[in-house]
Amino acid sequence: MKQYLKWFWLLNKRLYKKVTFVALLLLIPLLTLFFSLFAKESGGFAHIALAADGDDAVAGAVIEELLDSSEFIRFTRCASAEEAVRMVRNGEADGAWLFPSDFEERLAAFSKVHSPYRPALTVVEREATVPLRLSHEKLSCALYKYCSRALYTDYIRDALPVFDGASEEELLAYYDGFRADIALFSFESASSSGELVKTNGYLMTPMRGLFSVVVTLSGLAAALFFMRDEQKGSFSFLPDSKKPFAAFACGFIAVLNLAAVMLISLYAAGLGISPLREVGALLLFAVSGCLFGMLLQQITGSIRVLCALLPLFAVVMIAVCPVFFNFASLEPLRLFFPPTYYIRSVYRNEYFLYTALYCLGMAALYALLRRLRWRAG
């Protein structure tokens, strides 16, 4: 046992003398730092300028709520309506929402069934885009709770004559006194782990997928290192039947190093879930990443070819695996790559089994190709 631990230590130590491995290792914390700094910057799919004419209390409350409400839409408060419109004209904002000085009165009148139509606020936009149309839903949600009070009292007086003698304060006392402590929606994904992950922003969510691509590349790099070592005769003391185990040990150690750095980075970025699940998923991922590199080593059979394929595989995995997008049409192709199984196993229990089956499949293909090469040679 002591001899195996010593061998493990030496294989691990020699990795840190290789520039490629160290570069991959440093890439994960650098990506974490980059995305963390980028996520702190103001961002969003749409930029809306907000301006209130006067000191209307409801307009001020709505603006304050909007400013703190969403990271998908960026809101900016302007000192005047003219400034907000100028930002739209100059392309500094996609739209402007202008609240008049009598906003509360207009909102109450707008909410009444039989009142003449009078817009509660003005919306100025450069062009009709999908993000701006979605932003209208955000505006409607922000205004509804103020409209609903007027809608309630108007309906009561119109439909229930028994309350004709009740004052506005009495009617609103019933409205304000009602509280329903129930959740209207429950969000779950099919076959999920049941864990909800809070992130530091939507810009941080692709980090797990990008990390998994880097870790998979380390498995390919380890396969390259082993091929070079074989050419140098570093493993000539081993019989051919034992060399696959040496290749697996070299690859697994390399992938495990990056997986450990990845785990620390995920928690540092606020993306980690339960430690037991994270560690289990990463260990399976380390095995699959190592076997993936070993299989490609057998398929290519050439250091030069495998080196040329490394950047191609990086681009393909980012595009095909569910890192940024999850297109159903790419499902058959993405199932060939280890990051797909890892990303899904973190949240879906059945993918632990699928990852294990994937590892068995990769090992069987590796053994088959190795046997064919041995017979051909």
Image (cartoon, grey):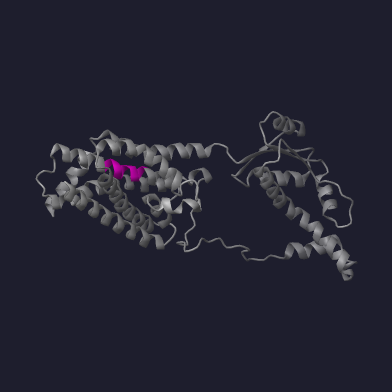
Q: Residue furthest left?
A: 237
- The N terminus is located in which quarter? bottom left
Q: Residue furthest top?
A: 90
Place residue 12 in its image quadrant: top left
Viewer-side residue, 159 vs 25:
25
In the image, residue 20 sits, relative to residue 350, either above or below, namely: above
Please state if 251 lies on the left or on the right of 355 as rendered: left
Please state if 73 lies on the left or on the right of 292 as rendered: right
**Residue 346 picture location, percent across and down:** 41, 56
Q: Residue furthest bottom?
A: 162
Q: Which secondary structure is most common in the magenta stretch?
A: helix
Q: Residue at x 41, y 43 (%)?
A: 316
* Extent of the magenta region: 214-222
Q: Is residue 65 visible?
A: no
Q: Residue at x 39, y 54 (%)?
A: 341
Q: Is residue 9 visible?
A: yes
State the count of labels: 0
**Residue 79 picture location, percent across and down:** 73, 33
